Image: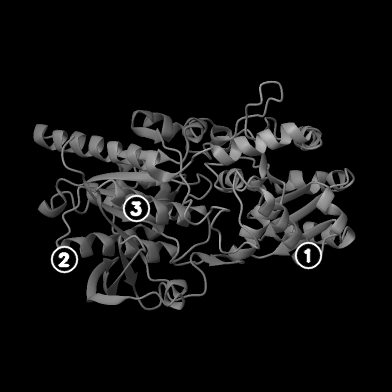
């Protein structure tokens, strides 16, 4: 292989700077893993109010960068910081665009100017790289917010010598978010009107930034092998399965890794006690701490404690949980919920928590520290997703000796192996049909194993020894970068 490619890594959120979900964890950890493999990787994201409030050390590197947006030229600044591992991070500031309380919208809906905001970010990121002389080989962009970048490279900047050898990789973290905007806003994107057609950015009369990323990128990836297959079907393709099948030769499923520096019960600073596979005593201390913190009955120290840490949304299987929560509690078990999302699920779970106080605790909102304590203190984690591109909580749970019960879909199916008490193999419990009774049956099977102490110790040990670190996935990305770089440069040589 030739020297490692230079990668411009662009995402709408990156931990620890700005986070609403798992995308930020991936965008924070993968560049650091790439750097360890010798890749010259630099990260870009908007300079949100959340980033400013985080008090990260920053310095301004460009003032008044001129960025075309529709028929206007806007000016913004670029600031620089870095990850703890030394990966450079560039923050794109524009007064009025990113200095808001939230990243993408409010509980009432998306910000109406999201097309302007992320078109600006996309073009600013490309123009800054040119101004800074960062001759990158591959731009790796993530989700609909960056879907215009591959389109810009193939249209607006196709004749610019600076970008002539740049290949693009576009990663879909969730097909459910497609970046749809009215057709009459096309001029804001800067794309020529000739690109608005069914083989371009047009999607049922609208503009779709997700579709732009899929069609114009040299390669598209998803965050697990199974999800890459699922999204090519009508059930999971969210209306874009035909587009994905058309591009199937350039579609790859690379499983997300996790950052064990942040998620390891042996070192986790959020926990009352530390533990590991060789000494599990600390886990009982963590359960005792969680029971006290959430006001649960002390008798649950001797009974199984289930947990769910999730967005409270239909995709996450919240309707299944609401249907069977009372059945679970009747099995002499406890339940802890942490999350926020759709009001109907929040209200239903809060009401159940009030009805069964002492056995069920519900915390609405997101609390990173509490999430770690729940992960360590619970016995089992519930992940009944309708669909799940990858999922990270079930992988964290394995490390914490908290046995996952998941629906066999997407990355959940790729990362969890059904426990077989006869062979002693497997790391959790899975159900296939999206059905409350199927979910409850696997919970009962898990309880049966829980009461068999030897078998339970085995499934816990199996999970804690599983390795989903980023090293292997990062190597797969490096190979993909090299493939698209060579293939794209070959096309240029042939004049294709």
Q: Nearer the viewer, residue 402 or 27?
A: 402
Mark 3 surroundings: few (<14), some (14-19) or many (≥20) residues within 10 A? many
Is the Cβ of the residue at disc 1 closer than 8 Å to that at disc 3? Answer: no
Q: Is residue 118 visible?
A: yes
Figure label count: 3
Mark 2 surroundings: few (<14), some (14-19) or many (≥20) residues within 10 A? few
Q: Nearer the viewer, residue 130 or 408?
A: 408
Residue hosting label 3: 31
Residue 369's disc number: none
- Of the two numbered discs 1 and 3 on the same chain, state the one appearing first in sequence: 3
Q: Nearer the viewer, residue 164 or 211?
A: 164
Quadrant location, the C terminus: top left
Question: Compared with residue 425, is residue 38 higher up or lower down, i.e. above or below?
Answer: below
Residue 292's disc number: 1
Is the Cβ of the residue at disc 1 closer than 8 Å to that at disc 2? Answer: no
The spot of residue 207 in percent (x, y) is 41, 51
Furthest-top residue in this view: 422
Quadrant location, the N terminus: top left
Mark 1 surroundings: few (<14), some (14-19) or many (≥20) residues within 10 A? few
Give the CA separation, mark 1 to mark 2: 56 Å
In this picture, residue 261 sits left or right of residue 401:
left
Going 77% across and 36% down the picture, which residue do you hit? 453
Dot 2: what SS? helix
């Amino acid at each position: 292989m030739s020297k490692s490619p230079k990668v411009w890594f662009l995402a709408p959120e990156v931990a620890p700077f700005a986070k609403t979900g798992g995308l930020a964890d991936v965008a924070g950890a993968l560049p650091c893993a790439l750097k360890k493999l010798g890749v010259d990787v630099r990260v870009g994201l908007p300079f949100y109010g959340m980033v400013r409030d985080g008090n990260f050390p920053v310095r301004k590197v460009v003032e008044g960068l001129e960025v075309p947006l529709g028929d206007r030229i806007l000016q913004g600044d670029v600031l620089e910081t870095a990850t703890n591992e030394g990966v450079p991070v560039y923050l794109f500031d524009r007064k009025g665009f990113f200095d808001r309380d939230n990243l993408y919208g409010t509980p009432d809906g998306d910000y109406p100017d999201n097309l302007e905001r992320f078109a600006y970010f996309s073009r600013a990121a490309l123009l800054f790289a040119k101004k800074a002389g960062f001759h990158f080989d591959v731009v790796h962009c993530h989700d609909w917010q960056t879907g215009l970048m591959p389109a810009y490279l193939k249209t607006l900047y196709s004749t610019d010598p600076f970008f002539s050898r740049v290949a693009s990789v576009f990663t879909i973290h969730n097909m459910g978010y497609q970046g749809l905007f009215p057709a009459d806003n096309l001029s804001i994107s800067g794309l020529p009107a000739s690109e608005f057609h069914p083989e371009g950015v047009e999607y049922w009369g609208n503009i779709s930034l997700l579709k732009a990323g899929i069609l114009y990128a040299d390669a598209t990836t998803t965050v697990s092998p199974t999800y890459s297959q699922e999204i090519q079907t009508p059930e999971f393709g969210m209306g874009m399965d035909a587009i994905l099948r058309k591009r199937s030769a350039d579609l790859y499923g690379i499983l997300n890794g996790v950052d064990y520096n942040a998620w390891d019960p042996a070192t986790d600073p959020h926990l009352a006690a530390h533990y590991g596979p060789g000494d599990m005593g600390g886990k009982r201390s963590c359960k005792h701490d969680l029971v006290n913190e959430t006001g649960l009955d002390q008798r649950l120290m001797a009974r199984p404690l289930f947990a769910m840490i999730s967005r409270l949304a239909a995709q996450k299987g919240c309707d299944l949980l609401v249907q069977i929560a009372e059945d679970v509690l009747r099995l002499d078990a406890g339940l802890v919920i942490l999350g926020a999302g759709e009001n109907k699920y929040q209200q239903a779970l809060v009401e159940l928590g009030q009805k069964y106080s002492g056995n069920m605790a519900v915390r609405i909102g997101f609390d990173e520290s509490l999430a770690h304590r729940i992960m360590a203190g619970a016995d089992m984690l519930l992940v009944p997703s309708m669909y799940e591109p990858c999922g990270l909580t079930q992988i964290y749970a394995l490390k914490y000796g908290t046995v996952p019960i998941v629906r066999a879909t997407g990355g959940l199916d790729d990362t969890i192996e059904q426990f077989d008490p006869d062979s002693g193999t497997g790391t959790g419990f899975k159900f296939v049909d999206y059905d409350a009774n199927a979910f409850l049956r696997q919970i009962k099977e898990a309880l049966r194993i829980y009461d068999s102490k030897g078998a339970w110790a085995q499934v816990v040990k199996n999970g804690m020894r599983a390795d989903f670190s980023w090293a292997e996935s990062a190597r797969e990305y490096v190979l993909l970068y090299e493939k698209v770089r060579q293939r794209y440069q070959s096309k240029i040589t042939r004049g294709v």
